[in-house]
Amino acid sequence: MLHYLTILVCCQLAGELIVTALKMPLPGPVLGMAILFAGLVVNGGVPDDLGKVADGLLVNLSLLFVPAGTGIMLHTGLLSRDLVPIAVSIVVSTIATIAVTAAIMSALSPPQPDGKDGRDA
């Protein structure tokens, strides 16, 4: 299992290195996930041990939010000063995310057996 954890960290490191070297406007871990995804596609699926490692990380994911929560508590004055722009950006980005996800799901969904595509005319 340590082998698969090392692969995950190496994919993230590769993403960080590529983003830094090419000065790309993209987070390194996102590119690292794309590299991991490409490797899994080439491999033909997710190995069982990699799934176990990923499940272990997901179970403890809440621990990764402790530093962010601490930062929010330390900057409550700044947050209260800029509450309206922050709230507007959260609402707009959430709506945009839902709309894009719905559009992609609609475009990629297989046709329904009765010939309807699930969209209202």
Image: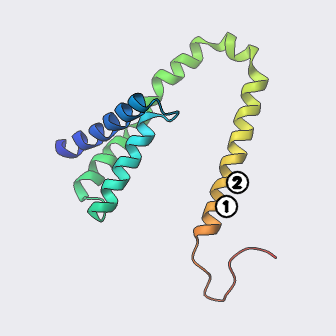
Circle 2/circle 1 CB separation < 8 Å: yes
> Which residue lies under the disc numbered 2?
99
User: Mark 1, residues whose alpha carbon is within 10 Å: few (<14), some, or many (≥20)?
Assistant: few
User: Mark 2, residues whose alpha carbon is within 10 Å: few (<14), some, or many (≥20)?
Assistant: few
> Which residue lies under the disc numbered 1?
103
Which element is circle 1 on? helix
Tell me residue 94's x, y (percent).
68, 43
Colouring chosen for the image of the structure: rainbow
- The residue under the point 29% across, 65% down is 44
Kind of residue at disc 1: Ala
Tell me residue 19's x, y (percent).
42, 33
Q: Quadrant of residue 88?
A: top right
On the rendered structure, is 30 left or right of 90?
A: left
User: Relative to 88, is 78 above or below?
Assistant: above
- The residue under the point 36% across, 48% down is 35
User: Relative to 75, is 85 above or below?
Assistant: below
- The residue under the point 38% across, 29% down is 21
Q: How many marks?
A: 2
Q: CA distance from mark 2 to mark 1?
A: 6 Å
